[in-house]
Amino acid sequence: MNRRIRLRHLLYGLGGLAAAALVALWAGLMPVTASSGHWRITAWFLHWVMQNSVRTDALFVETPAEIDDPVLVRRAAGHFETACRFCHGAPGAPAGPLPFNMTPRPPGLEHAADAWSPAELFRIVGHGIKFSGMPAWPAPARDDEVWAMVAFLRALPQMDAADYAQLSGRAATAEAGDSLPARAGCVACHGTDGGSDGGAVPVIGGQRADYLAATLTDFRDGRRTGGIMQVATAGLDDDTIARLARHYAGRRPEPDPAAPADPERLAQGAAIIADGMPEARVPACSACHGAGGAAPKPGIPRLAGQDAGYLAGQLHLWRAGTRGGGPRAEVMTRAASGLSDADIRAVAAALARGEKGRGYRDTLPGGTAAPAAD
């Protein structure tokens, strides 16, 4: 009997505490102001829950083998500078004053790779953290971009101020001064001439102006998915987009040295570009992009001279159905679905050999030349 009475008193006590807590919350007695900070136990509890959640989610994430590829590091560096550095700071570029008054305060990331595994960083960057200022990645389907940011975070501890300025585009932006691409934020990734920087970004210098303008508009309006470019284009008006397109269309960047390629692979790629693969329902690339990818129709990108790795990555995205964007998205998704990994490597290598398809001219069987645009 005594045990039952004690249990009843305990339940009454717990109920009374719960009721008192509800009254206090209803009366607004619990502070939610950022200036008040968290109680220590609250901060510990929230961080403990977050760590456990991230660790469990990461169990189902497979880390790609090329996670430390310098190209991935460079691809994310400009975005970190424009979208992340303000809160988290970087070597030689401290965070602004506003983040110091946030609750919780955004942490510095110089040692994030020591505290979290690549898979855990992928979950944090890709999905964000509730009850904090950490947002999810703007384009949920673009795992490739999230992995690029993870690669950057893994490289961050080895960077000094000069390394960061070079990789993030801070140095190039300062050099570009008050030019339109610098004001629009393009210089951090694309420079002033629109080169590929070793395949980290696409070659946009010398690209068709109508295609560049349409692409920027599609990113801005959400028709094309890409966390990096959707953020970069968010504040651009139509006039600025048109001027940027004309600027880069009028540039001719120095091409990156073409990587050695197997003659057989180049021949295979040239054949697909010229004739397609009818048995796999893959149309000829030249039908839209011109011979050798160098003379596209209006509104279609020039592919000749692009970096092979970048082209292959885009074809993989098309094949997976996560690239999207533009009026011809369905055509490209259907065409890429018939390409094997070997086909993608071959087409990318052939297109990357230079303008108008030059570079694989002498590698085809029997000495025949690949078609080239004038």
Image (cartoon, grey):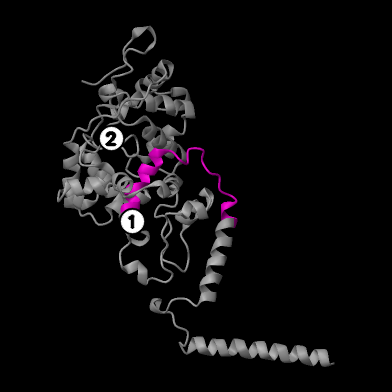
- What label sits on residue 301 in the rendered view? 2
Measured in 3D between alpha carbons, the distance from the residue under mark 1 to the one under mark 2, in whole angstroms, is: 27 Å
User: Could you tell me the amino acid type at mark 2?
Assistant: Pro
Number of residue marks: 2
Instruction: Please state, as top left, top right, bottom left or bottom right, where the C terminus lies in the image.
Output: top left
Which of the 4 image quarters holds residue 287? top left
What residue did someone put label 1 on?
A: 83
Estimate how packed mark 2 is, as few (under 14), some (14 to 19) or many (20 or more) residues with alpha carbons within 10 Å: many
At 36% across and 43% down in the image, what residue appears? 75
Which of the 4 image quarters holds residue 95? bottom left
Estimate how packed mark 1 is, as few (under 14), some (14 to 19) or many (20 or more) residues with alpha carbons within 10 Å: some
Q: Looking at the image, is mark 1 or mark 2 earlier in the sequence?
A: 1
Under circle 1, the secondary element is helix
Coordinates of residue 78 in the picture (x, y in percent): 32, 48
Coordinates of residue 179 in the picture (x, y in percent): 15, 48
Coordinates of residue 369 in the picture (x, y in percent): 31, 12
In the figure, is residue 234 to the left or right of 364? left
On screen, residue 44 above or below 58: below
Coordinates of residue 322 in the picture (x, y in percent): 43, 44
Along the viewing direction, whichever of 308 and 292 lies nearer the viewer: 308
- What label sits on residue 115 in the rendered view? none
In the figure, is residue 118 to the left or right of 34? right
Instruction: Please state, as top left, top right, bottom left or bottom right, where the N terminus lies in the image.
Output: bottom right
Which residue is the extreme one toward the top? 366
Along the viewing direction, whichever of 25 and 173 lies nearer the viewer: 173
Looking at the rendering, the stretch of residues picked out in magenta corresponds to 56-81
Along the viewing direction, whichever of 234 and 262 lies nearer the viewer: 262
Magenta stretch: includes residue 154: no
